[in-house]
Image: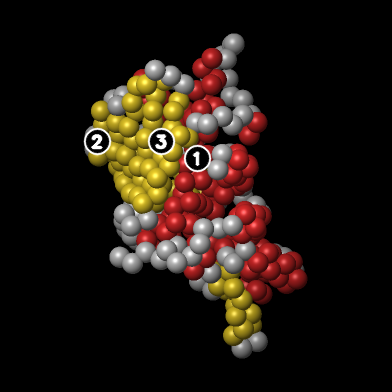
């Protein structure tokens, strides 16, 4: 099992996912830093992501869109707030309008990634912090719809792992 | 902030119904539409260029999964998003977790290709990637 633990703090509206990967932190960093590699996992197969701009330096901005089965595009952005290659990354993650401009009325998620070397490779800890319950609801309303098809293929495995 | 925790986690049947309901692109879109604003079945039928009956069928599946509810307004049947179903923070975090589990699985697949015999960047069918 790759995902070793998940912690859901409903009071703090925080989700922490810890996984162990069979590669060194330097290699795992690349799947975040290289937009072509990032594109291969950020969106589910039915909603592939295309990263137009991608800059993981502190203050850097990322602009991407996900394309749905019917050609619908969902735009998003990151604003990188802290970087310590290849150990940690902090970024705000939000939605954008069709022109790729950040929208003010949509919630912003605060993401924090740490990559820690372990004997078998890397322990990756991803923390997602949501501003309000309404924001989380809105995100899932969009994100779940986009992500659900991928989750379908994995639900058996998730349930099997309890 | 008050977080609603009074609902039990989804049981297996509810999970099946929820995922089954959302397995269809049109139904996902209907949920997205009516979460923004309640819509009549006939408006949805126009939107998807479908028969009234076909949309009714989709709506019925979504109703059984408690994702939407129908309400009569005059002569029209309005379909609204059932926010309560996805309101509880636990469920929302569950849903968000499944998104991230999918991402982690895809990272694993991507890293596994490094050890491939030929071109490490050679894309494989990600859907067949094994789950570890």
Depth order, front residue of B112/A96: B112
Determine which residue is flagged by label 1. Answer: B101
Determine which residue is flagged by label 2. Answer: A82
Determine which residue is flagged by label 3. Answer: A18
Label 3 resides on the chain identified as A
Most extreme residue toward the bottom, as rendered?
B74
Which residue is at a point 50% across and 71% down the rendered structure image? B37
Labels 2, 1: front one: 1
Have a look at marks 2 and 1 and say if they share a chain: no
Which residue is at a point 57% across and 49% down the rendered structure image? A148
Left or right: A61, with A69 as reference point = left
Which numbered disc flags the more N-terminal residue, 2 or 3?
3
- A17 in relation to A99, above or below: above
Label 2 resides on the chain identified as A
Left or right: A108, with B13 as reference point = left
Q: Quadrant of the C terminus of chain B?
A: top right
Which residue is at a point 35% across and 42% down the rendered structure image? A127
Left or right: A24, with A46 as reference point = left
Dot 2 crowding, Cα within 10 Å, few <14, some 14–19, many 20+: some
Task: Tell me where residue A62 appears, x and y as whole percent.
Answer: 35, 39
Depth order, front residue of A15/A140: A15
Q: Give the spatial CA distance, label 1 vs label 3.
A: 10 Å
Dot 3 crowding, Cα within 10 Å, few <14, some 14–19, many 20+: many
Dot 1 crowding, Cα within 10 Å, few <14, some 14–19, many 20+: many
Mark 1 secondary-structure assignment = helix
Task: Tell me where residue A111 appears, x and y as whole percent.
Answer: 33, 43
């Amino acid at each position: 099992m790759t995902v070793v633990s998940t912690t859901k703090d409903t009071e703090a509206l925080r989700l922490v996912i810890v996984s162990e990967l069979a590669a060194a932190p330097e290699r795992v960093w690349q799947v975040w830093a290289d937009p072509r590699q990032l594109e291969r996992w950020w969106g589910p197969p039915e909603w592939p992501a295309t990263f137009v701009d991608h800059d993981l330096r502190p203050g850097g901005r990322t602009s991407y869109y996900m394309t749905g089965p019917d050609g619908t595009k969902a735009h998003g952005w990151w604003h990188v707030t802290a970087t310590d290659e290849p150990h940690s990354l902090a970024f705000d993650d939000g939605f954008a309008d069709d022109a790729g401009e950040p929208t003010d009325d949509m919630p912003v998620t605060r993401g924090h990634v740490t990559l820690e070397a372990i004997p078998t490779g890397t322990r990756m800890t991803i923390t997602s912090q949501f501003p309000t319950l309404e924001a989380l609801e809105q995100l899932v309303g969009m994100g779940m719809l986009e992500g659900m098809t991928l989750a379908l293929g994995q639900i058996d495995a998730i349930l099997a792992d309890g | 902030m008050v977080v609603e925790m009074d609902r039990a986690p989804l049981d297996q049947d509810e999970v099946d119904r929820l995922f089954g309901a959302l397995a269809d692109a049109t139904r996902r879109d209907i949920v997205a539409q009516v979460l923004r604003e309640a819509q009549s079945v006939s408006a949805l039928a126009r939107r998807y260029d479908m028969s009234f009956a076909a949309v009714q069928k989709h709506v019925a599946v979504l109703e059984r999964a408690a994702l939407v509810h129908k309400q009569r307004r005059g002569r029209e049947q309005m379909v609204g998003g059932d926010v309560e179903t996805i309101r509880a923070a636990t469920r929302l975090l569950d849903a968000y977790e499944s998104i991230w589990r999918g991402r982690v699985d895809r990272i694993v697949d991507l890293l596994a290709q490094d050890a491939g015999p030929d071109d490490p960047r050679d894309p494989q069918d990600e859907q067949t990637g094994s789950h570890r």
